Amino acid sequence: MLNPYYVTGFTEGEGSFYVSVSPRKLEQVEWEIRPTFSLSQNKENRGILYQVKDFFGCGSVRPSRKDDTYRFEVRSLKEINDKILPHFRKFPLVSPGKKRDFEALCNVVEIMLQKRHLGKEGLEEILQILLKSRPDSKRIYNMKKLRELMNV
């Protein structure tokens, strides 16, 4: 079993917390909000990702389509809320950027658990969180464009 402090440290270097927003006709809205926790490793070191999967008891490991790496990903809202968030609250991140991304993910998960993401106001709130969490990110252009497309 992996040491929980190791998992947090490993995430500091090789992990990410992010929320994707993509056009997709779903029940009440035309946009899919997908919170994700992921870790990456090269093919040679992919074994550690399976250990992390066992540690959390959720997620999946898959090869990346872009390069010769592998990813451990958790995309289930329930698993992120029940397993990922509690771990990083108990064994907190240190670096400002990862902490900011983690807090943004926490806020989006809360909105989704309350099902507010299904309405225009909740969607706008999520976009504000994402814009504030990474003001220097290249995705800001995409987020602004997304707001225009969504009319929010």
Image (spheres, rainbow, N blue to C red):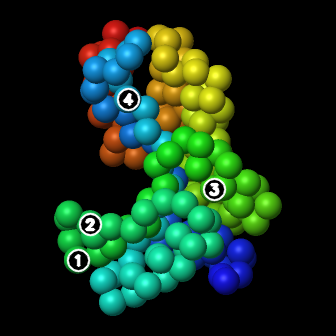
- Does residue 136 appear in this view? no
User: Vertically, is 51 above or below 85?
Assistant: below
Residue at horizontal 54 percent and vertical 60 percent from the top: 58
The image's mark for residue 32 is: 4
The N terminus: image quadrant = bottom right
Give yes or no for contact between labels 1 and 4 (Cβ–Cβ under 8 Å).
no
Q: What residue type is labelled 1?
A: Asp
Could you tell me how far apart the alpha carbons at marks 1 and 3 are, in whole angstroms? Answer: 26 Å
Mark toward the viewer: 1 or 3: 3
- Does residue 42 appear in this view? yes
Can you identify the residue that label 2 sits on?
64
The C terminus: image quadrant = top left
Could you tell me how far apart the alpha carbons at marks 3 and 4 are, in whole angstroms? Answer: 21 Å
Q: Which of disc 4 and disc 2 is earlier in sequence? A: 4
Can you identify the residue that label 1 sits on?
68
Q: Which of disc 4 and disc 3 is earlier in sequence? A: 4
Q: Is mark 4 on a helix, strand or loop?
A: strand
Mark 3: few, some, or many residues within 10 Å (few <14, many ≥20)?
some
Count of marks overlaid on the render: 4
Residue at horizontal 59 percent and vertical 50 percent from the top: 79
Q: Which amino acid does label 3 sit on?
A: Ile
Mark 1: few, some, or many residues within 10 Å (few <14, many ≥20)?
few
Q: Is mark 2 on a helix, strand or loop?
A: loop
Is 52 left or right of 75, judged from the image as shown? right
Which residue is at the front of the view, 45 or 15? 45
The image's mark for residue 84 is: 3
Residue at horizontal 40 percent and vertical 46 percent from the top: 137
State which quadrant residue 44 falls in. Answer: bottom left
Q: What residue type is labelled 4?
A: Glu
Mark 2: few, some, or many residues within 10 Å (few <14, many ≥20)?
some
